[in-house]
Amino acid sequence: MAGLRLGFVAVVAASLLGAGPVVAERLLVLTATAGYRHESIPATAAAIEDLARPLGLVVERLDGPVPLPRLPLEGVVAVVLAQTTGDFLGGEAAAALESFVRGGGGLLAVHAAADAHYGWPAFEELVGAWFRAHPPGLQTTLVRFAPDLPGFEALGGGREWWVTDELYDFRSNPRGRVQVIATIDERTYEGGGMGADHPIAWCHRVGRGRSWYTGLGHRAELFADPVMREHLSRGLAWVIGRGRTC
């Protein structure tokens, strides 16, 4: 009862001051797929929800039907593409997402999100690059974080992180169009197709908005790793405008 009374007083006080009640920012998490559906989708969505909670974001998950006809973007501060694949957005929804990001909204995309909408040129700009292929199975590689990203040393691994995952090649190297956050070392695994410079995570501006992508996340277990969670946490804070670095 005391908590309800305090909440009521806060709303009344805000109204008297002309500010109106405080409305929580919304985070829209899309898990719809029109192509391959990753088993790690529940772990991806759960990790995002965990990381959104201390930021005070209200999380709403949208899974279907596909193609999604519309996106409920009112009050949304960022959209998360949590392993979305194929042409998962209908025409109206696609136009709304592009307008949302260009107009100042945030976009956070995980792993298979790059494997989508190959016939929609703006999607490559929104995410940063399209998926091309990956070597068979899971392999272990060395992830190197960019030297201007502080804080990863506190996790015990410095700026280098050995990880086992499905390792994506992209149709083009996005460096030059994006700020590369992390690369993987093709000398440490078999079948890489991008050469000595292989970005695996990046961020960039799209109009007035912010976009962040990681190619990691095929394995559900990866979302319990503290380095992966720090990686995602930085991205989420940056796309909603609360992080100084991505």
Image (cartoon, grey):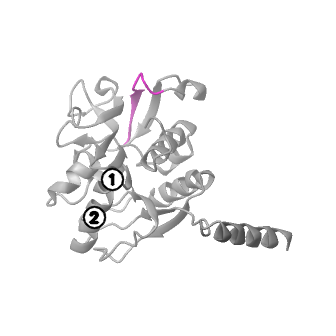
Determine the secondary structure under disc 2: loop
Q: Tell me which residue sits at (34%, 60%) in the image.
A: 84
Depth check: 129 or 178 in front?
178
Percent position (x, y) of residue 219? 45, 48
Residue 101 figure quarter: bottom left
- Does the residue at mark 2 contact the one at mark 1 (Cβ under 8 Å)? yes
Percent position (x, y) of residue 222? 50, 44
> Mark 2 or 1 closer to N-term?
2
Depth check: 104 or 204 in front?
104
Residues rendered magenta in the picture: 138-149
Percent position (x, y) of residue 149? 45, 27
Report the quarter where the N terminus lies: bottom right
Depth check: 119 or 243 in front?
243
Local crowd at mark 1 within 10 Å, few (<14), some, or many (≥20)? many
Q: Amino acid at mark 2?
A: Gly
Check disc 1 and report the residue beneath it.
112
The reply to whether the magenta stretch includes residue 139 is: yes
Q: Using the image, determine if residue 205 lies above or below residue 58.
A: above
Q: Amino acid at mark 1?
A: Ala
Residue 205 in view of the camera = yes
Count every numbered label the image shows and give the total: 2
Q: Using the image, determine if residue 12 lies above or below residue 238.
A: below
Check disc 2 and report the residue beneath it.
35
Most extreme residue toward the right, as rendered? Answer: 2
